[in-house]
Amino acid sequence: MDAQEVQLDSYPNGAVEARHFRIETRQVPEPHEGQVLVRLRRLGLNAGLANRIGGPDTPYGPSIKAGDVPASDGVVEVLESRSAAFKPGDLAVRKSPWRSIDIAAEDELRSIPALGSGIPLEAHLTILGHTGFTAYTGMMRFGGVQAGDSVFVSGAAGGVGSCAMQFAKAVGATVIGSAGSPEKVKLLGTLGADAAFNHRDGAVLDLLSAAAPTGIDLFYDNVGGEALEAALEHLRFGGRAVICGGASQYARGSEVKGPSNYLRMVYQQLTMRGFDVTSNEDLRPEFEAEVATWLRAGKVRSVHTLVIGFAKIPEAFASLLTGGNSGRMIVDCDS
């Protein structure tokens, strides 16, 4: 059986663009014992993957070289099975190569409810998926968010940020979000933000001070750079910062800078913590149970931008890196 796959064609000299990828056809072998043949239904794209294109290996995966097929989390449907755990028609989530049809080992798959369960496929890649789990791990385990906290989320209209903001609201925190366009700021309001601002409207510190004049207790950072400096300046005594990503520094060749005001961590007894979500799988049952309850109660919802067509994966990924998404960037691969 033939499948289409997206390969890295060339290294970018600057921003990653659709032209740096190519689509090729390859033959897919028959599944062996303990394996299944799967069709990719939905693919979730992550901006952080850009760091591995021609870069070093990371905890999230190896360097991506010319000719390699990137991988990110996807929803797949079982077509053929040589596993007692799965049958044709079953749905699952896996770290999926950017390939339309593939062979997967049974232990690579995590079953999800069948269609008709009331939860759309996209939700398993957003609020109940890897981005939701990342947001939950950082916000709950490492951020220790509590009712009454004042929380600032940078990149709050992105895949992880939109989940982090909703989770903080669900536990009773006051939430301030930043985004990069008027449309995204409006979206944050529909998600329950108590205050939101466009970081392009001025100095982030001034915008944050106006949105949270008495300070913040917790900063969930997806951006880095100026947002991180502003948050450190505005954190109350004993405040916490959780570092999830640095979207402002993902472009190849961009200057990587640490916060110039890091000594405030000493004077204000602040804590700043980065985390690797893959090392926190023990938290997943709690996450799935709590967030599914919030989802059914209408306290949270999936936020995503849906691009139609497997062949659109390179364009969707490039758009993601320039902020062309609200919530998670997802490709519908059914066509």
Image (tube, rainbow, N blue to C red):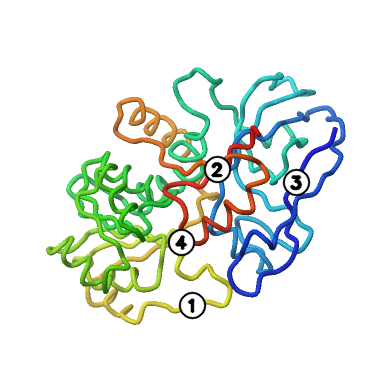
Q: Which residue is mark 1?
A: 256
Residue at the (65%, 56%) spot, across then down = 61
Left or right: 321 in relation to 213? right
Q: Residue 228: name its quadrant.
A: bottom left
Tag 4 and tag 3, C-beta contact below 8 Å: no
| Helix, strand or loop status at disc 2 | strand
Residue at the (27%, 39%) spot, across then down = 170
| Helix, strand or loop status at disc 3 | strand
Measured in 3D between alpha carbons, the distance from the residue under mark 3 to the one under mark 2, in whole angstroms, is 17 Å
Compare marks 1 and 4 and give the one earlier in the sequence: 4
Front-most of residues 309 and 233: 309
Q: Which residue is mark 2?
A: 307
Measured in 3D between alpha carbons, the distance from the residue under mark 1 to the one under mark 2, in whole angstroms, is 31 Å
Q: Which residue is mark 4?
A: 245
Q: Which dot, 4 or 2, sits closer to the camera? A: 2
Left or right: 149 in relation to 9? left
Q: Position of residue 283 (x, y in %)?
A: 46, 40
Tag 3 and tag 1, C-beta contact below 8 Å: no
Front-most of residues 17 and 118: 17
| Helix, strand or loop status at disc 4 | loop
Q: Is residue 244 above or below residue 98?
A: below
Q: Which residue is mark 3?
A: 5
Please name the amino acid that badge 4 sits on: Gly
Residue at the (31%, 50%) spot, across then down = 144
| Helix, strand or loop status at disc 1 | loop
Compare marks 3 and 1 and give the one earlier in the sequence: 3
Measured in 3D between alpha carbons, the distance from the residue under mark 1 to the one under mark 4, in whole angstroms, is 13 Å
Please name the amino acid that badge 3 sits on: Glu
Q: Which dot, 1 or 2, sits closer to the camera? A: 2
Compare marks 4 and 3 and give the one earlier in the sequence: 3
